[in-house]
Image (cartoon, rainbow, N blue to C red):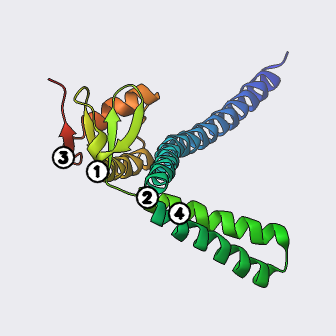
Amino acid sequence: MSYDKYVQTIVDLKKELACIESNSQQVGRHFEILQREAEFLKMEFLKYSLEKQRTAAARQRGFALLIRDRKKIGIGLAVTVGGSILGGLLAKDKDAALNAGLSGFNGVLQGFGETRWAVSLQKELVIVPYDAITAAGTWATLESLVAAIDDLETETLQGKRLGTIDNIIQTLQQSEGKLIYIALPK
């Protein structure tokens, strides 16, 4: 191998290494962006999950109240029938009318069951009505927990990594400035 070929091979290797380094930095930046988005999505999913729990609990609570108070049954049925008729007039479709009626009834149940909500900050985040808190455990208001989650969302966009749900709950428990506690463990 001649000296010129040797020099050319070294130059070509340096160019290839520079290209590989540039590509790896680009992949690293892309990975960082994906990681931030994944952490942000954890917070979005957590808020979505809490909202689903809240609406299910409100619906269940509303149904129990509806059963106890016979006057409310008439209101619920009136909303259902009214929603069905209005849905049928607008959509001219029986299925759409039924869906509109059931959706209206679902909304009535949920509305009857609305109250102030508390969240258990144990291993799992459990939502219960404010007046149904058990003495055991750590409880905070749902509104304050959502505010703390919003703050964590902002931090994730700035690069903070949260880890597992246990880590997230622990981080939320330590966000004392935001959380409004209802009951604390003894």
What's the amino acid at mark 1?
A: Ser
Residue behind mark 1:
144
What's the amino acid at mark 4?
A: Ile
Residue behind mark 3:
177
Name the residue: 24% across, 45% down.
Answer: 179
- Quick check: marks 2 and 4 in contact, CB under 8 Å? yes
* Residue 1 located left or right of residue 51: right
- Quick check: marks 3 and 1 in contact, CB under 8 Å? no
- Residue 117 x/y as whole percent: 33, 49
Q: Residues within 10 Å of mark 3 (few under 14, many from 20)?
A: few
Q: Nearer the viewer, mark 3 or mark 2?
A: 2
- Quadrant where the N terminus lies? top right
- Quadrant where the C terminus lies? top left
Q: Nearer the viewer, mark 1 or mark 2?
A: 2
Q: Earlier in the sequence, mark 1 or mark 4?
A: 4
- Residue 60 x/y as whole percent: 50, 47
Residue behind mark 4:
73
- Quick check: marks 1 and 4 in contact, CB under 8 Å? no
Q: CA distance from mark 1 to mark 4?
A: 34 Å
* Residue 143 located left or right of residue 42: left
Residue behind mark 2:
69
